[in-house]
Amino acid sequence: MTLPEFSQRSLSGALLKLLLAGSMLGGGTVVGQTYPTRPVRIVVPQSAGGSTDLVARPLAHLLGGALGQNFIVENRPGAGSIVGTDAVAKAAPDGYTILAVAASFSINPSLYKQLPFEPVRDFAPITQVSSFPNIMVVPRSLAVNSIAELIAYARARPGQLNYASSGIGTGTHLSMELFKTLTGLDIVHVPYKGGAPAVNALLAGQVQVNLATISTALPYVKSGELRALAVTTGKRWPSVPDLPTLAEAGLANYEYSSWVGLLAPAKTPSAVIDRLWVETNKVARAPEMKRILAHEGAEPVGNSPAEFAAIIQREIVSWRKVVERAGIKAD
């Protein structure tokens, strides 16, 4: 073998090894670029028409257009969202079954002694799609016009006021228990089967207070049937800019946001997670989706998988403290 022949063959072999190594290292990128090649199922672990469903459906439509495959919403309610969530935890980690989940995902670990899944271990966060506040509302017949007046009114009547929630362990329940913890008030909890029945009870005078989701309560605030006192977020909210935050109203340590986010089963390829994050962030900020979110009193978020994971882990810890302090137990 001559020296030129040897050099050429050696170079070809080295180049082949380099290309193979590059393809192995970049394999995740290739997967991410080709995904999806078939329809994707978005499981909503609550009933159709709820706040999570109202975000998931238009999001699925827009993701389908952006990625060239159908994104199909499947409602699997049951056991406080545990049934649908567990189904996704046990699904194949290939990006073709993902979960649209609400803030209750980080509450349930404190309410239930044994879950069929582990929220941190069994899921790969994709992104927090949207965020929205609860708003403190009272009926027009109640003679209070501010948080300070509500606190004074309730303090003078311990155990005489009732507050409604959309059910034990929901955000409307725990956000009010946090309020009670910070104020030391004795207000009785009356759970209902959903946000709409809770607001109807408020309208009927059966209860006097509700920290309702903004989408549920705002129409009645605009019609004058309910009086809004404050929002739960750390900043004033664009759809109700005149409402103070609870922090501004004197509860310096109060902050609560409801949210909707996307999760995938653990071990889903990182390239698929990143593709879903990037595309979800784009469509969540598209004019059509922003209009839909604004109608629900929500704003797009689109944080990274790591940022979303940190929020979930932080909330699991903070809600456990509220649940234990209030002695809340799931039915």
Image (cartoon, grey):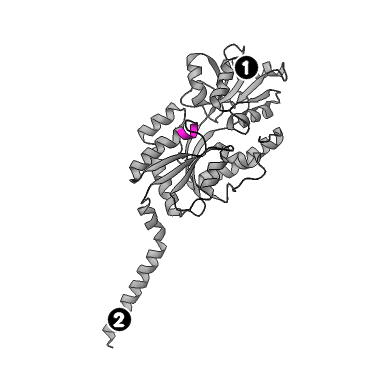
Q: How many C-alpha atoms fall within 10 Å of the one at disc 1: few (<14), some, or many (≥20)? A: some
Location of the C terminus (image quadrant): top right
Q: Which of 302 and 159 is in front in this view?
A: 159
Q: Looking at the image, can residue 189 be seen?
A: yes
Image vertical order of residue 52 relative to residue 185, above or below = below
Evaluate if marks 1 and 2 touch, with contact meaning CB atoms under 8 Å apart.
no
Which residue lies under the disc numbered 1? 206
Answer with the quarter of the image where residue 138 lies.
top right
Image vertical order of residue 38 relative to residue 21, above or below = above
Give the alpha-carbon distance from disc 1 to disc 2, as whole Å.
Answer: 89 Å
Mark 1, secondary structure of its residue? loop
Horizontal side, residue 27 vs residue 234: left or right: left
**Where is residue 28 drawn, in percent x and y?**
41, 58
**Mark toward the viewer: 1 or 2:** 1
Which residue lies under the disc numbered 2? 7
- The amino acid on which the numbered mark 2 sits, given as a three-letter code, is Ser
Question: Which residue is pictured at 30% across the width and 83% down the height?
Answer: 6
Question: Which residue is pictured at 50% across the width and 55% down the height?
Answer: 267
Q: Farthest residue in the bottom direction?
A: 1
Q: Which mark is residue 31?
A: none
**Where is residue 37 drawn, in percent x and y?**
36, 51
**Where is residue 50 drawn, in percent x and y?**
49, 31
Over which residues does the magenta segment extend?
Answer: 47-53
Circle nearer the N terminus (1, 2):
2
